[in-house]
Image: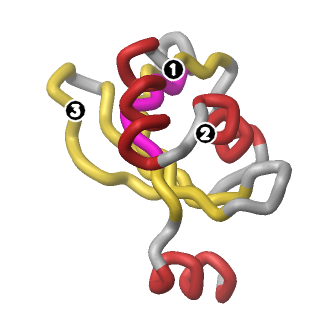
C-alpha cells in the first residue's frame, strides 16, 4: 500500500488530543515509519476501507493508527489513534 498524502481532519485532531493524548503529528509519524498495516473493516464507500497501522513515532511511542485509505488518490485519512495495547506491542515486536 502506497500512501502519498495523509489527512487529519480538525475534528479528529481534537478528539485524538482530548480522548487519547495523541497528536496528529504523532499519527502521521507512524504512517511514515513503515508500519505494519492490516485490514480493519469495509468502508462505507466502495473501495475505501478502514485499516489499522501499528508502529512507532519518531520519539519511540507505540501507536495504533486507524485510517481510511483512498486508493485513487493514495491518501490516508486518519480517523483515530491510540497507544498500542500490551498484546499489540508483543505482536508488533515479534514479527
Task: Evaluate whether residue 44 shows in this view.
Answer: yes
- Judged from the image, the secondary structure of the residue bearing numbered disc 2 is helix
Residue at the left extreme, as displayed: 44
Which residue: 55% across, 83% down? Answer: 91
User: Which tag, 1 or 3, sits closer to the chain's start?
Assistant: 1
- Quick one: 73 or 62, which is closer to the camera? 62
For the stretch drawn in magenta, what is the main secondary structure? strand
Residue depicted at 49% across the width and 77% down the height: 88
The answer to if 90 sits in the magenta stretch is: no
Is label 2 in contact with label 1 (beta carbons under 8 Å)?
A: yes
State which quadrant residue 2 falls in: top right
Residue 74, numbered label: none
Question: Which residue matches tag 2?
Answer: 27
The residue range painted magenta reads 75-81
Residue linked to disc 3: 43
- Residue 77 at x, y = what percent? 46, 23
Using residue 73 as the reference point, say whether residue 46 is left or right of it. left
Label 2 crowd bin: few (<14), some (14–19), many (20+), radius 10 Å:
many
Question: Residue 8 — which label?
Answer: 1
Q: Name the quarter where the C terminus is drawn.
A: bottom right
Amino acid at each position: 500500500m502506497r500512501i502519498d498524502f495523509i489527512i487529519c481532519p480538525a475534528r479528529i485532531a481534537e478528539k485524538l488530543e482530548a480522548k487519547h493524548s495523541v497528536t496528529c503529528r504523532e499519527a502521521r509519524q507512524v504512517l511514515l515509519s513503515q508500519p505494519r498495516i492490516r485490514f480493519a473493516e469495509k468502508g462505507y464507500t466502495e473501495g475505501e476501507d478502514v485499516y489499522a497501522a501499528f508502529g512507532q513515532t519518531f520519539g519511540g511511542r507505540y501507536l495504533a493508527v486507524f485510517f481510511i485509505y483512498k486508493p485513487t488518490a493514495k491518501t490516508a485519512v486518519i480517523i483515530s489513534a491510540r497507544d498500542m495495547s500490551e498484546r499489540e506491542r508483543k505482536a508488533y515486536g515479534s514479527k
